[in-house]
Amino acid sequence: MISLSYDLHIHSCLSPCGDDDMTPANIVGMAALLGLEAVAVTDHNSCKNCPAVLAAAQEYGILAIPGMEINTSEEIHAVCLFPDLEAAMSFDAYVYDRLMPFPNNEEIFGHQLLYDSEDHICGTIPNLLINATEISFDDLWPLVRSYDGVMFPAHVDKSANSLMANLGFIPPDSQFKTAEVKDLKKLHGLKKAHPYLEKCRIISDSDAHYLEHIHEPGLTLPVEEKSARGVVEALLRGL
């Protein structure tokens, strides 16, 4: 068993709320500068910058896990991570077909920039990525598992777009074994109010939209191997 310093929830410039400086190479370069060992770029409802992220990570010698922050039909955010790029891109196609076909207005919402492996802009995504999908939170766990991935609810302590804020409770038939908490000082109160969390691995990520917000090393994740699959399996196991 080895431990990896991580930040598994980062937005690139593909997310309309992400800063334009959040290019794949800039993100991975900042992670390397900080000394992180594993990162995941998880754009809203899209994995389309993951190929460029993985290419940059290989150059910098950092482990990158392909992923997405999905917005469910209940407006709950959840992070979905995958053991390989093929699974992530198949999931991406499934989700995009179930995203509200509302055109992005760059002047209002921001750019949705696609990058190639050389860190050059190669396109944009036409439909606004921050909208809700047709996929419910209850359906998300088995759906992500069908792509060999793992799902965990994002920033459960936040007052918007979180499982607690939008539902007010954890569904009793939930299967996730990892949960993300933004402010770990709130963890004791969260566990008291929601005992389900007692059996979960708790992680904390930056949810960075700007380079300077990417986490510095501190928290670690124990994995059996340093690979995307190793990270996915650790989050599947939970505690």
Image (tube, rainbow, N blue to C red):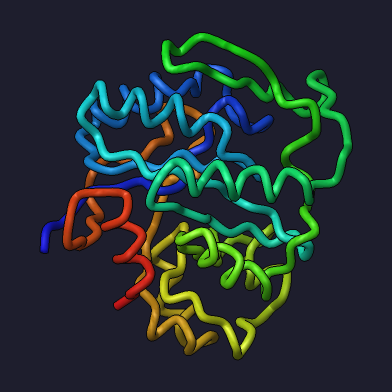
Above or below for 141 versus 62: below
Q: Residue at x 77, y 29 (%)?
A: 109
Residue 118 percent across, percent down from the top left: 42, 11
Indicate the quadrant where residue 27 lies.
Answer: top left
Task: Tell me if I can see residue 184 in this picture.
Answer: yes
Placement of 87 over or under 152, stated as above or below: above
Q: Where's the C terminus, which quadrant?
A: bottom left
Q: Position of residue 213 (x, y in %)?
A: 43, 35
Q: Can you name the residue that lies furthest to the right here?
A: 102
Q: Position of residue 161 (x, y in %)?
A: 68, 58
Q: Which residue sits at x=60%, y=90%?
A: 172
Does residue 155 appear in the picture of this structure?
no
Q: Position of residue 62 (x, y in %)?
A: 24, 34
Q: Could you tell whether 83 is left or right of 14 in the image?
A: left
Q: Is residue 64 left or right of residue 174?
A: left
Task: Locate residue 83 relative to residue 226 in the image: left or right.
Answer: right
Query: Which quadrant of the figure has residue 107?
Result: top right
Image point 45% across, 81% down: which residue? Answer: 197
Taking depth in this image into account, of 149 and 37 the one nearest to the observer is 149
Q: Is 82 located above or below residue 29 in the figure?
A: below
